[in-house]
Structures are given as C-alpha cells and as structure tokens.
Image: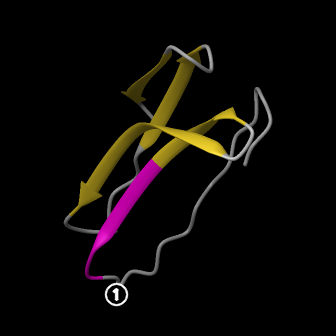
Amino acid sequence: LFPIAQCRTMEIPMDAVWNRLECKDLAFIAVYKSIFVQEFASAMYNYCYKLTGTTLIPHWSQTQC
C-alpha cells in the first residue's frame, strides 16, 4: 500500500519469465478493487503509470518515464 502522492520503483529480475502487475485500491475495510492489470513479455523495459481519480472511480494511464 502506498499513501497518496507517492512514487515507488519495483525492481523485477532480468531472468523473470512471466511479469504481471496488478494495481488495486483499498475501497473499504479489507475490500480491494482492481484498477488495472498489465502483463509483460520482458523485464527489459521501463514502464511508468499515473493514477488519478478517487477510490471509487480511479483512472490510470501509462506515461513517459
């Protein structure tokens, strides 16, 4: 869980064969809502995301790193 207005970097091993990123928000006590799911064929690329909106109506976009 990351607080509002925070940035985080996740290091993925170069030899990973299946990369899946799922972003969720805490919609209620112990209730998570999926915002997006991305699957990657390779860990060689950098991907950055911007999350906006509210807990109930989240938005996301892939941005330049």
Residue extending furthest toward the bottom? 15
Dominant secondary-structure state across the stretch colored magenta: strand
Viewer-nearest residue: 41 or 60: 60
Amino acid found under the numbered disc labelled 1: Asp
Q: Tell me which residue sits at (74%, 43%) in the image.
A: 2
Based on the picture, tell me whether residue 20 belongs to the magenta stretch. yes
Colour pattern: secondary structure
Q: Specify start and end residues of the magenta stretch as a single range.
A: 17-22
Based on the picture, tell me whether residue 43 belongs to the magenta stretch. no
Residue 49 x/y as whole percent: 47, 34
On the rendered structure, is 32 left or right of 65? Answer: right
On the rendered structure, is 11 left or right of 27? Answer: left
On the rendered structure, is 19 left or right of 48? Answer: left
Residue extending furthest toward the left? 41
Residue 41 x/y as whole percent: 19, 66
Q: Tell me which residue sits at (75%, 35%) in the image.
A: 6
Snapshot quadrant of residue 27: top right
Determine which residue is flagged by label 1: 15
Residue 51 x/y as whole percent: 54, 25
Determine whether 34 is above or below 46 in the image. Answer: above
Q: Tell me which residue sits at (38%, 38%) in the image.
A: 36
Q: Tell me which residue sits at (68%, 49%) in the image.
A: 8
Viewer-nearest residue: 1 or 11: 1
Determine whether 26 is above or below 46 in the image. Answer: above
Snapshot quadrant of residue 34: top left
On the rendered structure, is 40 left or right of 33? Answer: left
Element carrying mark 1: loop
Residue 14 x/y as whole percent: 38, 81
